[in-house]
């Protein structure tokens, strides 16, 4: 069950457990403790602060860890300040907080308690949205986010089996009140799955379909990765794509490729809307065919510009300038980390006009002005300390964080 935890991943560093306190992640905690010993583990619970009792649940999770000698930390998020889809915002905040915790504590990887049942419910939710292969081929077993490796070692285990394990050992867990709230799509999917039993459909049969769909998906992945190796160049933070070759690809591959490109550039972990993307690509490629003046579109916080047979994807300066400044050494704008020792209080933000004025030789970089305006730079108050892309002689290097240093990783992540 824990094959993926093997030493090659952890290499002597602690293993992190994302512990919500619910049955799945509590079972994960105990299974991992039996296999690796308590001293090899660290656990964290994010208190979302969204409902009464969350602080108490985090305390309970901490107490359960203390009882078996596992170091535990409670992380906090001010959910009340979030806007938009709260569930979604909470999920993202959770991954960001867990990744920061793991990086700070030297943790090799963070294990999540998703089960075969979660996978089956996700498949049904995908069907309700008319999803294609992308949305129906199951959760990833491992992925990297904000520089942290996450694993889902329980994806082949059933929720009932994990609870039976806890009951057998006399171990307790907290039941999330949301698990019976039929306003949530996941709970509706759970109920729908139960109702499908007479048809012979359950989480185990859906797991077989998911495995088959995943196989088809991987075959397409190989094709698209090979295409990208031949036709896409990563130019520091930008991507350059062979426009005529792109124009010959079927729509679903164009969507996949540009969707991944815009995620990679914007640092957002969700793709742009498919219709908007295909519309922009269609208009730009048509203009290129007519040899019309260079066209440009802005989408998903990025610029798409086509000229001389190449489509350049770059960060839109206005979007980068809106991204909040971050302390040196942390992820800025969803993808950049400026490496190297920095004085206390130094902050990373977009270079902008004021910064570019301080980089007289920027033309020698060969990057367009817009890409440089949106590029990362290090400041102390109003003083520019480093601009790794616009003034490459400055000592500090800007590196892409986590899986975003390699476009292929984003292209193949699902
Ligand atoms: N508050 C939390 N603190 C720490 N880990 C958590 C928390 N909530 C969830 N997790 C981790 O995420 C796993 C999945 O939880 P859950 O199914 O509630 O999340 P989800 O939002 O549906 O999943 P995903 O984030 O992948 O979409 C849990 O088993 C646990 O490992």
Image (cartoon, rainbow, N blue to C red):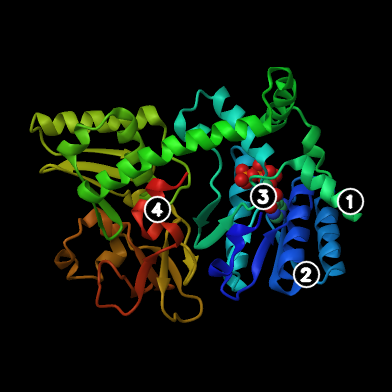
Residue 252 position by quadrant: top left
Q: Earlier in the sequence, mark 1 or mark 3?
A: 3
Q: Nearer the viewer, residue 68 or 278?
A: 68
Q: Earlier in the sequence, mark 2 or mark 1?
A: 2
User: Please, what secondary structure does the residue beneath circle 1 have?
Assistant: helix
The answer to whether mark 1 and mark 3 are in CB contact below 8 A is no
Quarter containing the N terminus? bottom right
* Residue 409 marker: 4
**Rendered image: mark on residue 154:** 3
Beta carbon of the mark 1 residue lies under 8 A of ligand 1:
no
Task: Write down the residue under mark 2.
Answer: 70
Gap between marks 3 and 4 measured at Cα: 23 Å
Does dot 4 land on a helix, a strand or a loop? helix
* Residues at discs 2 and 1 in contact (Cβ within 8 Å): no
Residues at marks 3 and 2, CA–CA distance in whole angstroms: 20 Å
Q: Is residue 52 left or right of residue 112?
A: right
Q: Which comes before the other along the chain, label 3 or label 4?
A: 3
Please tell me which of labels 2 and 4 falls first in the chain: 2
Q: Label 1: which residue? A: 168
CA–CA distance between discs 2 and 4? 33 Å
Question: In percent of the image, x 67 and y 24: which residue is there?
Answer: 201
Going by the image, does 209 lie left or right of 117? left
Percent across and percent down for residue 288 are: 13, 34
Secondary structure at badge 3 equals loop
Q: Is residue 390 visible?
A: yes
Up-down: is 90 above or below 39?
above
Observer-side mark, 2 or 1, equals 1
Is 320 placed above or below 359 here? above
Q: Is residue 97 left or right of residue 8?
A: right
Q: Marks 1/4: CA distance? A: 41 Å
């Amino acid at each position: 069950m824990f094959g993926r935890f093997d030493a090659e991943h952890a290499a002597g560093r602690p293993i992190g457990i994302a512990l919500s306190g619910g049955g799945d992640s509590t079972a994960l905690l105990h299974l991992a403790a039996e296999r690796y010993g308590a001293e090899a583990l660290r656990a964290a619970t994010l208190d979302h602060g969204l409902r009464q009792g969350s602080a108490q649940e985090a305390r309970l999770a901490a107490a359960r860890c203390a009882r078996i000698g596992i170091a535990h930390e409670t992380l906090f998020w001010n959910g009340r300040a979030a806007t938009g889809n709260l569930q979604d915002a909470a999920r993202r905040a959770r991954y960001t907080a867990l990744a920061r915790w793991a990086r700070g504590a030297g943790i090799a990887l963070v294990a999540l308690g998703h089960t075969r049942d979660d996978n089956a419910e996700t498949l049904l939710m995908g069907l309700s949205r008319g999803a294609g292969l992308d949305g129906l081929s199951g959760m990833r077993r491992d992925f990297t986010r904000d520089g942290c490796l996450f694993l889902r070692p329980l994806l082949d285990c059933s929720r009932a089996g994990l609870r039976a394990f806890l009951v057998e050992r006399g171990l307790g867990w907290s039941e999330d009140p949301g698990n019976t709230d039929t306003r949530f799509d996941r709970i509706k999917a759970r109920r729908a799955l139960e109702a499908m039993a007479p048809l012979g459909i359950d989480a185990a049969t859906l797991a077989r379909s998911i495995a088959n769909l995943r196989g088809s998906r991987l075959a397409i992945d190989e094709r698209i990765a090979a295409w990208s190796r031949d036709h896409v160049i990563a130019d520091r933070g930008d991507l350059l794509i062979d426009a005529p070759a792109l124009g010959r690809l079927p729509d679903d591959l164009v969507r996949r490729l540009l969707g991944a490109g815009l995620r990679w550039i914007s640092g957002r972990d969700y793709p742009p809307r498919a219709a908007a993307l295909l519309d922009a690509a269609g208009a730009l490629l048509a203009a290129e065919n007519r040899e019309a003046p260079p066209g440009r579109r802005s989408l998903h916080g990025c610029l798409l510009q086509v000229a001389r047979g190449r489509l350049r994807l770059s960060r839109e300066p206005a979007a980068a300038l809106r991204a909040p400044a971050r302390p040196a050494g942390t992820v800025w704008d969803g993808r950049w980390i400026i490496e190297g020792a920095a004085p206390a209080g130094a902050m990373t933000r977009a270079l902008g006009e004021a910064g570019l004025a301080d980089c007289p030789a920027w033309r020698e970089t060969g990057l367009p002005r817009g890409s440089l305006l949106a590029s990362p730079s290090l400041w102390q108050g109003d003083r520019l300390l480093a601009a790794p892309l616009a003034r490459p002689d400055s000592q500090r290097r800007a590196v892409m964080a986590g899986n975003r240093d390699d476009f292929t990783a984003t292209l193949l992540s699902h």
